[in-house]
Image (cartoon, helix red, strand yellow):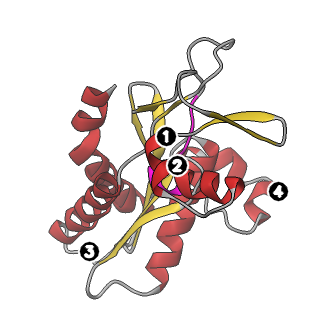
Amino acid sequence: MIEFSPSKPITQLSGAKIMTSRSYSKKISGVSGIATLILTFALMGFSYSAAADEDSPYLTIKRMTMETANAVALAAVLACREQGVQSSATVVDKNGTVQAVVRDTLAPPVSITVSRLKAYTAANFSVATSELGRQANSSLANVPGLMMGAGGVLIEAGGTIYGAVGVSGAPSGETDEACAKAGVAVVIDDLEMAD
């Protein structure tokens, strides 16, 4: 968990207060203020959740590490492999940005795209894609970039949504979803202990 506090420097950007870490700012020399902010956020890996106190001048930020995202994706693919299924798994952050992708040796190339769409959809709707039956029968089903089929599940612990994982390659969405859940199960204790 990364926490910014008023004791750290404040930079104004479009009228919003953005807290930056001194240590990262000092390491990036010769870069403009906005570029420094962008690099700082990229280096520290940000997604956000509101602080408990709405009047607080800072946000508490929680995000999966690269290692956590990779562990989820690999565990999901291995869970499918144990069932004799070649699959792909994509892990996205809360915003739907890809953090990790694993494709088993013989998984069809299209499974990479489908797993990404499932993960993106789960993250943006904050629900497993198998629970989007009503939306699948609405105009949302025609929105490019969404996949309402089963196989996308949230990576959530202690009330915080860290992102989602999508799996594709199995003959059924239910199998894809079971593999995705197995991937999340590998890291859930660590995420809950971190809260």
Circle 1: element type: helix
Q: CA distance from mark 3 to mark 4?
A: 32 Å
Q: Is residue 22 left or right of residue 67?
A: right
Q: Residue at x 67, y 14 (%)?
A: 54
As drawn, 87 above or below 32: below
**Upstream in the sequence, badge 3 or badge 1?**
1
- The image position of residue 186, as x and y in percent, is 21, 47
Please report contact status of discs 2 and 1: CB closer than 8 Å, yes or no.
yes
Tag shown at residue 22: 1
**Upstream in the sequence, badge 3 or badge 4?**
3
| Residue 142: quadrant of the picture | bottom right
Q: Residue at x 49, y 83 (%)?
A: 110
As drawn, 176 above or below 188: below
In the rendered structure, which segment of residues is drawn in magenta?
Answer: 42-49
Question: Which is nearer the eye, 146 or 43?
Answer: 43
Circle 3: element type: loop
Mark 2: few/some/many CA within 10 Å (<14, 14-19, 20+): some
* Residue 72 in view: yes
Please report contact status of discs 3 and 2: CB closer than 8 Å, yes or no.
no
Q: CA distance from mark 3 to mark 1?
A: 48 Å
Residue ID for mark 3? 85
Q: Residue at x 23, y 59 (%)?
A: 75
Disc 4 residue type?
Ser
Disc 1 residue type?
Arg
